[in-house]
Amino acid sequence: MGLEVVLPDGRVLNDLRRVRKDNSGYALRHLFLGGEGTLGVITAAALRLVPALKRVETAFVAVPTPDAALSLLSRVLGSGAEVIAFELIIRDCMDIVERRGAANGIRVPLPLESPWYVMVELAAAHPAVPLREMLEDALGAAMEAGEATDAAFAESEAQRANFWRIREDYPELARQEGPAINTDTAVPVSAVPRFLERIAAALAERWPEGRLLALGHAGDGNIHVSLRAPPGVDRETWNLRARGAEEVVNAIAVDLGGSFSAEHGIGQSKRHAMATHKDPVALELMRAIKGAIDPRGVMNPGKMLP
């Protein structure tokens, strides 16, 4: 809700107000959120707390297509419960988890017979909310409509933790499979199926030897797409051979009204994408703000702005 920030000249901006409404000029805290340290150093923050969750229900669901996954999302949103996770995972990612994760105790909860899977989690702050019934009703309707073909519920906290390990341990397990070109894109939720369809076609056309991997937060449109190298190809070779794959994915995301950097920031590695895809007027304003607050360029130089 508010920040304290040390500015490049040593002054301290005290913007720690905790009120819900404050229209007394520019919302300065937003300059520093996402600024990657290029405008100042955040030294304190005022946070709004929410009630602890008393009930959680988690399920792994097999779905035939990303379109079906979005229909399921609509159903669970319409159940009245709070949807706190809705992760879309392509089968090839699940194959990696099954193959690499078993040695670490990770168990895939469903037979890997579907092209896509979803992990969905509902929560409530009050223990009396009938989350299980809400989720069962939504999944039952989805199965009747052909939007889901199988489902497994977490029947204990240990099973729920295993479900989450599938999602959270996947990046490390995928690295064990070999090199890949990775992206961090987001599109409007309604555009997720079209996005996946377009990138699959575009990447297959230029790099048919690569393997498309995709998973991410379908509930907010943030899909992580990777182009995996074929067996036996080392990282340096694949980076050269598949140069341009990230740009293909970024361009499609932006064309669909999305972003080329959803949650991991710009740093140095995405400055080229800023130059290519960021609105020129937005870049001009960012440079003006940077010049006004940090005229000597001492805050995290060489980062974010091209």
Image (cartoon, helix red, strand yellow):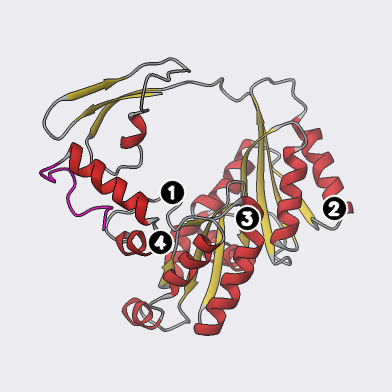
Label 1 close to label 3 by CB (< 8 Å) = no
Q: Residue at x 77, y 37 (%)?
A: 78
Residue 174 seen in the current view:
yes
**Residue on which the image places disc 2:** 143
Q: Which residue is mark 4?
A: 277
Q: Amino acid at mark 2?
A: Met
Task: Name, please, the residue furthest toward the right.
Answer: 144
Could you tell me which secondary element the residue under label 3 belongs to?
strand
At mark 2, the secondary structure is helix
Q: Residue at x 36, y 63 (%)?
A: 273
Point out the image quarter for the N terminus: top left
Sequence-first disc among 3 and 2: 3
Of callouts 4 and 2, the N-terminal one? 2
Q: Which mark is residue 88?
A: 3
272 to the left or right of 230: left
The percent coordinates of residue 153 (x first, y second) are 73, 44
Tell me whether circle 4 and circle 2 mark residues in contact (CB < 8 Å). no
Nearer the observer: mark 3 or 4; the answer is: 4
Percent x, y of residue 163: 61, 48
Position of residue 166 relative to residue 227, above or below, is above
Name the amino acid, label 3. Leu
Q: CA distance from mark 1 to mark 4?
A: 16 Å
**Residue at disc 1, secondary structure:** loop
Q: Quadrant of residue 26?
A: top left
Q: Name the element at disc 4.
A: helix
First of labels 1, 4 by sequence position: 1
Residue 305 part of the magenta-drawn span:
yes
Per the model, the C-alpha gap separating discs 1 and 3 is: 17 Å
Residue range in magenta is 295-306
